[in-house]
């Protein structure tokens, strides 16, 4: 005697047969991420123009990317729209604009005659830039506000861009230049070093400061105005060299007490992730089970 088969309504289909239906709600802050996208746009622009042999336009594009890289963080803080998504997206864009683009520009503009050595040095510059970004992401909560650990990758890219403008203004031939080869190796090294570079983030220009600061600002402006393309390269390169010299000689090292204080001061709440809503809908016996939003 056979058993009569049981009829199931479509609403009561077993969840194993239908599976779990998931909806991912993604909410991001538009304004700072659009500014970050402009950073990557100028980095890609720099790549295209470097390949086309228009090295000055490529250098200017890297400078433009640096401007938008500076703006996106400021806008995110001003509008209280900081997020993990924005931080990760910013790092990816920085790698394109300040790692890949300057590396390709250096190789095509100056290091190509060195053959294999030239493109390997350019690759080392890009790889060290990526390592610098990754280290910054994982150590951002324990480093001092007033100092960078290693040369920031936007500054390294700015030195590359300013070197193109300086060589062009001076009429020097960059092809197979040992000076530029050594500069590339130096920049790659100081980016991944533990040398301390002043960030000036603790300097609040909205407060009252000694009159000497205004005088120094006027002097710096006048020096740059003498020959902007050359003097900007000199200033940026001096910044990189002084950090390397002080680091090698051990001057201005961070005392252990200050380092511990910086770690204790980093007890801040983690940024809220943009991917903050995950809803799972399951059907069992004709009823939908709600799950918590994450």
Image: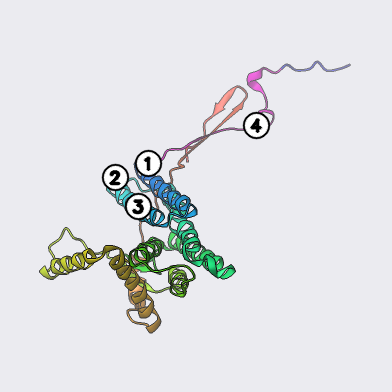
Q: Is residue 149 above or below residue 60?
A: below
Where residue 234 appears, as percent x and y from the top left, is 31, 70
> Is the C-beta separation of discs 1 and 2 under 8 Å?
yes
Element under label 2? loop
Q: Quadrant of the N terminus?
A: top right
Residue at the disc numbered 3: 64
The residue carrying mark 1 is: 29
Q: Is residue 10 left or right of residue 257?
A: right
- Callout in the foreground (4, 3): 3
Callout in the foreground (3, 1):
3
Q: Position of residue 139 (x, y in %)?
A: 43, 63
Could you give the CA–CA distance between mark 3 and mark 1, rounded to whole angstroms? 22 Å
Q: Which residue is mark 4?
A: 19
Residue bounds of the magenta highlight? 8-28
Which residue sits furthest left? 211
Q: Mark 2 or 4 closer to N-term?
A: 4
N-term-proximal mark, 4 vs 3 = 4
């Amino acid at each position: 005697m056979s058993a009569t088969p049981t009829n199931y309504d479509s609403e009561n289909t077993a969840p194993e047969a239908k599976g779990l239906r998931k909806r991912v709600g993604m909410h991001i802050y538009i304004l700072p991420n659009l500014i970050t996208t402009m950073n990557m746009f100028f980095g890609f622009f720099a790549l295209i123009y470097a390949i086309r042999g228009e090295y000055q336009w490529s250098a200017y594009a890297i400078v433009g990317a640096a401007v938008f890289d500076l703006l996106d963080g400021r806008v995110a803080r001003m509008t209280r729209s900081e997020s993990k998504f924005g931080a990760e997206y910013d790092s990816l864009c920085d790698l394109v604009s300040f790692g890949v683009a300057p590396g390709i520009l250096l190789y095509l503009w100056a290091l190509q005659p060195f053959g294999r050595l030239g493109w390997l040095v350019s690759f080392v510059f890009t790889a060290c830039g990526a390592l610098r970004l990754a280290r910054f992401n994982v150590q951002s909560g324990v480093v001092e506000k007033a100092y960078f650990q290693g040369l920031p990758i936007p500054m390294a890219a700015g030195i590359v861009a300013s070197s193109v403008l300086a060589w062009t203004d001076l009429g020097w031939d960059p092809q197979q230049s040992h000076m530029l080869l050594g500069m590339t190796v130096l920049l790659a090294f100081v980016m991944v070093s533990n040398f301390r570079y002043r960030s000036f983030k603790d300097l609040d220009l909205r407060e009252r400061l000694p009159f000497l600061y205004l005088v120094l600002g006027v002097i710096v402006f006048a020096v740059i105005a003498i020959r902007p393309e050359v003097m900007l390269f000199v200033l940026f390169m001096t910044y990189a060299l002084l950090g390397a010299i002080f680091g090698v000689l051990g001057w201005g090292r961070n005392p252990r007490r200050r380092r511990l204080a910086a770690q204790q001061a980093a007890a801040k709440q983690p940024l809220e992730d943009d991917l903050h809503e995950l809803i799972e809908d399951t059907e069992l016996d004709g009823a939908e089970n709600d799950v918590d939003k994450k």
